[in-house]
Image (cartoon, coloured by chain):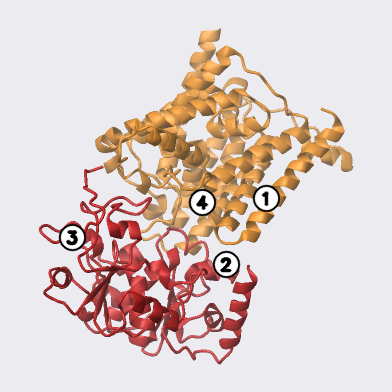
Chain colours: A red, B orange
Amino acid sequence: MSLKSWLGGAVLALSASVPALAADGPLVSADWVQKNLDNPKVRIFEVSVDPGVYERGHIPGAVNIRWHTDLVDPVRRDIASEENFEKLLGAAGVDKDTTIVLYGDNNNWFAAWGAWIFDVYGQGDRVKLLDGGRKLWEAKGLPLDSSVPSHKETKVDVPAADTSLRARFPDVLKVAEGEDKATKLVDIRGPKEFSGEILAPEGIKELSVRAGHIPTAVNFPWGKAVNEDGTFKSKEDLQKAFAEIGIDGKQPVITYCRIGERSSHTWFALAKILGYDVKNYDGSWTEYGNAVGVPITNLAGTVWQGK
Amino acid sequence: MSLPLRILLPGLLFGGLAFLALRMDAEGGPSRQLAFALLTGAALGIVLQRARFCFLCNLRDLVEARDPRGVLSILAALAAGLVGYFVIFGMWLPVPAADRLPPTAHIGPVSAALAIGALAFGVGMAIAGSCISAHIYRLGEGNLASVFALGGAFIGFILGFLSWNNLFLADLATGPVIWLPHHLGYAGALAVSLTALAALALLALWYGRATPAQPVHQAGAGAALKSLLVTRWPPIVGGVLVGVIGTFAYLRFAPLGVTSQLGSWARKAASNAQVLPDTLYSLDTFRGCATAIGEALLSPNGYLISGLVLGSLAAALASGQFALAVPSLGQIARNVVGGILMGWGAMIALGCTIGVLLSGIQAGALAGWVFLVVCTTGAVITLFVRRRLSA
């Protein structure tokens, strides 16, 4: 570990030595989580996509959420149903006053997606993201456990899905066609996907038959929001970075990526850390880039040839 | 080789391995797992070499020399690993619910393609003189002929990829994934599997002749050292150790398998040469020895294999069993042909005697048992034909 990150950790440790449960804000540090491992009013969830990651060792007491089946509808392309989401929380023993902490592999992308779903179902500020996710927890060599916890089941009742947090295709099309001039689109994919030079990132199968981005969108690769260790940049830095591309919180924002998971990460930064008015477009480029008869900006001019 | 060298060279090898592993461990993150894979491979290499744990040789000992010890060694590995896996399953997946499988365990589909792959593998290993894992540890013993068997397997893998889509559409796509605990529960699946292994052990003992009693070792450090470093380890001990190593590997990174890295390289080479179809249907979604092309030169499986060769090399050097053997032309031809059959079979069956037979049966997969039966049948018949031809 470099001296810099060691110092960073030490500063974090000092600042987190306040009593347990004093977790203001949308993020909690690894240190805070460590102090609250035995806190019955804190429930930790791991949202990892790689199989076997949770089972081979997770933060002690953490409950597993399987993204592909628990957070999305396995049949139609949609978020998990209200009923299934209630079951998920109930089985994990979440109570009305439980603080919920999410973390996961792959830079917390899917955990951030989870946080977005939790927000859609009205869980509000009690939902936190472990800053730095699984990567930082492992890098610090903090303890992992492989036993599956069992919690006393609770009856959970969540409000109906809040559609104002979710952008749908027509919302995005209105922006693209200039009908909605107020909303800003933020495309958080890599610059080469944004420009249309490539159809999908390295190692990922092409899922759209058109290259490029949604007209009027600005590019902000998700990684610009995080430090080297995977933690989010400070609120001030984030504010500055987004202001540079014209996102200053004065206008509503829609974030998107390829399938909506990396954009959840940026959604989290904008909506939860900066408090801007942001919707996540989970249809993302795999929906828009396949839609018929919609305008597209394709700077590179790459033509899809089925290869 | 002189005695000082027999101590010095393995010592240097272990020192190098330890240095590498510690350095990777200190890097933290994913490298920790790679360090563990490297050391697991080394441990496996030592055990395979010291116990001569080779599927074909053990089978041949029983069939041709009526010596049942090697087969008992394999059965012990299966039994020990079964218990280990089920201990882990009970923790990771407390209830074997119908729609869930334990993560990453090698529980592949049961299909006619699996049986054909296993048959090709069995025939191939009887032609090439041993299976893929044994050829890998024999590399460490200086057996240059193994290079040709592994080269053949590389070609076989490419042929496998070329036939994959047709087999997938004809049969594999609908092959059911049968996990015994889904149908029998954990206790039932374990009881049935262990009973089947016991029955096979009785069969081997019935067919085999009584083996000469092991000489009683004399007490003393010298004798102990000799039985550790020079004499073949008791087969049951070797088998149980293979089962334990398999359990540790599954617990920490992935089920044991020896073809994943080889297959991945073959796939990359063939894909770069543009001989592969753009899409291999669903291949990367099946459980078994994954051959997805990785970004790094070595996957975790690559580290396991590297450790295996080095561990076997160290053990062979220490025992004085290291000998550079230059193969004859006939041997080269047999190894290439057998290797091709093994590579093709392992690709279609999603693993070999380690990845499907060992790691599959240990995980309670019916596919593992199918592989065991068909591959053994193929090998026994081929051994019989070879004996007839050379008689």
Quadrant position of residue A242? bottom left
Q: Secondary structure at mark 2?
A: helix
Q: Which of the 4 quarters of the picture holds residue B167?
A: top left
Q: Earlier in the sequence, mark 3 or mark 2?
A: 2
| Looking at the image, residue A276 lies above or below residue B99 | below
Residue at horizontal 32%, vertical 34%?
B112
Q: Secondary structure beneath disc 1? A: helix
Pointer 4: what residue? Answer: B254
For the residues labelled 3 and 4, the Cα–Cα distance comes to 43 Å
Under circle 4, the secondary element is: loop
Between B159 and A303, the residue placed more toward the observer is A303
Dot 3 and dot 2 residues touching (CB under 8 Å): no
Q: Are marks 1 and 4 in contact (CB under 8 Å)?
A: no
- The chain letter for the residue carrying disc 4 is B
Instruction: Please state which of the two labelled residues, at mark 4 or mark 2, is closer to the viewer.
Output: 2
Nearer to us: label 3 or label 4: 3
- The number of numbered badges drawn on the structure is 4
- The chain identifier of the residue carrying mark 3 reads A
Residue A27 appears in view: yes
Q: Where in the figure is residue A286, as x and y percent of width and height?
A: 24, 59
- Identity of the amino acid at label 2? Ala
Q: Is residue A92 visible?
A: no
Task: Using the image as rendered, state which of residue A80 and residue A276 is in the foreground.
Answer: A276
- The residue to which callout 1 is attached is B20
Instruction: Give the labeled residue for mark 2.
Output: A139
